[in-house]
Image (cartoon, helix red, strand yellow):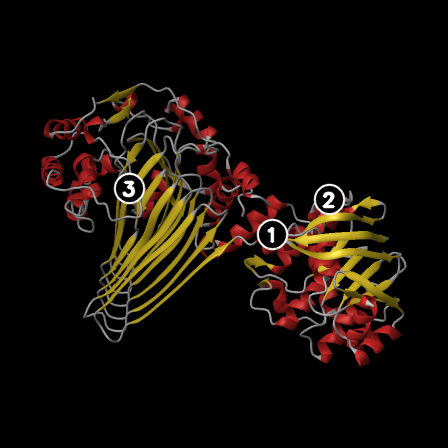
Amino acid sequence: MSNRDIEQLVARQYEHGFVTEIESVTLPPGIDEDVIRHISNMKGEPDFMLQWRLRAYRHWLTMTEPDWAQLNIAPIDYQGISYYSAPKSDEDRPKSLDEVDPKLLETYDKLGIPLHERAALAGVAVDAVFDSVSVATTFKEKLADAGVIFCSFSEAVRNHPELVEKHLGMVVPYTDNFFATLNSAVFTDGSFVFVPKGVRCPMELSTYFRINAANTGQFERTLIVAEEGSHVSYLEGCTAPMRDENQLHAAVVELVALDDAEIKYSTVQNWYPGDENGVGGIYNFVTKRGECRGKNAKISWTQVETGSAITWKYPSCILRGDNSVGEFYSVAVTNNLQQADTGTKMIHIGRNTSSTIVSKGISAGRAQNSYRGLVKVLPGAEYARNHAQCDSLLMGDRCGAHTFPYIEVANPTAKIEHEATTSKIGEDQLFYCRQRGISEEDAVNMIVNGFCKDVFRELPMEFAVEAQNLLNVSLEGAVG
Amino acid sequence: MLSIRNLHARADDMEILKGVNLEIPAGEVHALMGPNGSGKSTLAQIIAGREDFKVTAGEVRYRDIDLLELTPEQRAHEGVFLAFQYPVEIPGVNNVYLLKAALNAQRRHRGETELDAFEFLQLVREKMQLMQMDESFLNRGVNEDFSGGEKKRNEVLQMTILEPTLAVLDETDSGLDIDALKVVANGVNSLRDASRSMLLVTHYQRLLDYIEPDVVHVLADGKIVRSGGKELALELEERGYDWLQSGNAA
């Protein structure tokens, strides 16, 4: 199959390109202390929150954008971004789905997410973030019975300020990095989860993020705290409508797992990647970090990244507790002019800590896909273990795959393994399948899904199916 | 069944086939022998539809279809099967999953109902018994970490399930020990019937002790230089190929 055929097959339009017309209360573009006060005020936040935002903002002014990633980023005009946009119905929120703006529900329908049906069928509680404010939350009661708090970040700030104040910024401090600091200053909403001691969360928690209003950066903030012996699985998925201007998305996710607690965080990300010339598309600069603070704690990140013009994210684990476990399973797909620099950091601090990294990068078109990972073993981390497996799959001859593994070991008992492979979807593999009577398209899907199997099997069932479909659509026939 | 006339083909700038003529009637098994580099595998791959080779002249007709006009998958649907010389690994793709997708794609094409998972598994188990393969094959990736012999066995397993009308076996015997060779031959022989034709590409007369050919051809330097009965293979075993090639040149 020639490269031209491949390009034609790869060049398919983004399916979720539409804009819902909903009146928004949007701040004029620009950022200063007044904007931050305004955001905090509009959200009715306690003073500690405002002060924290302001400290972050003042720190941000001293920082410069990072440029070490294998990414080509057009300059971002931070004064050209509006830092707050919320559906108008913010004042009196819907009490149930019946009260939700029908246009909003329609949007979810277009995305193939019939909210109530899905929630009912799959037993998934959905905290839907539309632009920056949560508009619908389901299964509250069932969770409340179990003692689990699952709500929007704004609600948490209002209703559980002591929990927020205690945990906010403990894993990703407001000084952490340029984008996380910006987020700390201007974040508008996100999700908050608190699972008390000994509780196994009775359902998968799910949030659909969606960027809508034009030219509005999204700054979500998610905080998940799992107390001793608790267990929670959180699913995050997103798509975005087609826009002409690049949109900045700089989220922060913090996870805290105490003794014997387990947090599983799964992401399927399908934001608008820009057109085949690289116009439009989301900049996805995310800071995700989890801390296994207690002994025997476990944090597992699974991500399937197919969208965004540029992706810059490294879901990480700080393995502080003895015997704690960190996992990172990732599929990153880049097509056309997409760029991704993604990976993880595993910081081994406690004794007998172990981590696993499985990264699968797929590049097609003229895309660039980098894995960047750090495995760091501190002096006190006796008998730390790490295994990293980084595989890249190339389609066509104009894309690139890069692997940047960093390993820093300060304890001689550590055992670190790194394996990396790069392969092209083989003409041989394709021919083999076709000779058996399987169409080219089915063959590619089969081969790619096989390549990603180690990651997909980490996803919750319903998500795994979605992820496979997403991959099939993203790479329809993309071969070389 | 298969009729190849004056076939010329090249890869890059090199002419590999220089006018091959070959007729295989329905129900016959033909062996294709010849020295390394004579074009045997090229011929096998062209029949199956590999696009790396450019056919510059001649034709390949199969049951009155112009085979060269069809894509590889269309050829498969028409009943053409190639047992690969080097079966490729497809990591993470289940062996049985691929086989089921293949069989059902072909059944769809023929207007037959697709087999469900249960029916399919029953069929696979039966054929695996014939091929003396153990249960673990069901769960392994396509050729993933298979030994050379296992790969070849797997090719023939696929063949017994897909039941092609034209099977081309490209050095299916190489790398097999004598026991495995018997099993593979047994699988191939189980498919022999009046409606099915086969082309066995091989270097060794040994295979032909177990799968008895109707005709033996010798391909040398891109042409069939001699055809004969199975005794030709024995003669080749004794005398090598040189006498044929020099005879041809002279």
Find residue A365 and report its horizontal and vertical position in percent: 46, 42
What's the amino acid at mark 2?
A: Leu
The disc placed on residue A212 is: none
- Vertical relation: A403 (above or below) B35: above
Q: Are marks 3 and 2 on the same chain?
A: no
In depth, the one of B133 and A138 nearer the eye is B133
Name the residue tied to disc 2: B70
Q: Say whether residue A240 is left or right of residue B21.
A: left
- Vertical relation: B177 (above or below) A222: below
**Residue contact at pointers 1 and 2, CB within 8 angstroms:** no
Quarter of the picture containing the N terminus of chain A is top right
- Vertical relation: A453 (above or below) B236: above
The chain ID associated with circle 3 is A
In depth, the one of A8 and A411 nearer the eye is A8
Q: Residue at x 70, y 69 (%)?
A: B36
Give the CA separation, mark 3 to mark 1.
Answer: 35 Å
Q: Within 10 Å of the Cα at label 1, are there few (<14), some (14-19), or many (20+) other Cα atoms? A: many
In depth, the one of A166 and A253 nearer the eye is A253
Closer mark to the observer between disc 3 and disc 2:
2
What's the amino acid at mark 3?
A: Phe
Name the residue tied to disc 1: A430
What's the amino acid at mark 1?
A: Leu
Q: Say whether residue B23 is left or right of residue B179.
A: right
Q: Say whether residue A462 is left or right of residue B13.
A: left
